[in-house]
Amino acid sequence: MAVEEYAETYPLEAADFLRYLPGTDCGRCGLASCGAFADGLVDKRCRGADCPELDGRLAEAVDAVLPLMPRILPYDQWMKTVEGPYRAYGEPGPDSPVLVTGNFVETAQVLEDIFLAAGARLHLVIADTHGYSIDNAVEERWFKAANIYAAMNTGGLTRLVRHTELLIPGLAERFRSDVQRVTRWRVEVGPVSGFEIPMYLAARG
Ligand code: SF4
């Protein structure tokens, strides 16, 4: 019998949610602790809005991504590429964050679903990763600083923003200094999971 293979989409775990919860264990959600509430988010017994102590933007970010998980990516989608090198979400302004991703079609689609659900406002740079998802691009060394720099320039990003700060995926952390050296932008390492991005941005302000 053939075994069907699926790509990893890094659904959020309780520890991921816990980083954004108030951590006071106040019990106002009806549960004994923030940890129990985080478990409730993972198995969808709870919603972000059920925590009255949680910042409103964070609660909205949590509730936007919960229905999107888990996400199943079949193996036959691997290596298909999406057009780059730039996409705008939510009519971003010159101070909106700039995120970097690769050109694997499903990576772009998952991120788009997340950004639209969360009403995100950001610039997305889609670098050529040879159709690899971020984890595989890192492994195969296709997460290249030169390709990110090329995508930034081809997409006209420098005319759209007035800051010089890039957010790269947590999975690509080891390329941070390379990207910083080549682009001469400050590089921040973001979450491993795309599902965490709305919470990360809401907490960042
Ligand atoms: S109401 Fe919020 S802060 Fe209080 S225990 Fe529940 S999750 Fe934690």
Image (tube, helix red, strand yellow):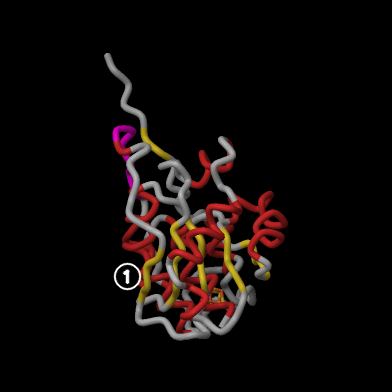
| Residue 33 in sight | no
Using the image as rendered, state which of residue 112 and residue 63 is in the foreground: 112
The N terminus: image quadrant: top left
Q: How many marks?
A: 1
Residue at 33% of width from left, 41% of height from top? Answer: 80
The C terminus: image quadrant: bottom right
Q: Quadrant of residue 170?
A: bottom right
- x, y percent for residue 81: 34, 46
Magenta stretch?
A: 71-76
**Residue situated furthest left in the rendering:** 1
Task: Judge whether residue 168 is colored magenta.
Answer: no
- Asked whether, in this view, residue 127 is left or right of residue 164, the answer is left
- x, y percent for residue 202: 51, 78
- x, y percent for residue 191: 57, 60
Q: Is residue 177 above or below residue 61?
A: above
- x, y percent for residue 37: 50, 66
Which residue is denoted by mark 1 in the rendering? 117
Residue at 56% of width from left, 47% of height from top? Answer: 143
| Residue 157 in sight | yes
- Asked whether, in this view, residue 63 is left or right of residue 58, the answer is left
Residue at 57% of width from left, 68% of height from top? Answer: 34
Residue at 59% of width from left, 78% of height from top? Answer: 204
Which residue type does callout 1 highlight? Answer: Ala
Using the image as rendered, state which of residue 123 and residue 112 is in the foreground: 123
Task: Judge whether residue 74 is colored magenta.
Answer: yes
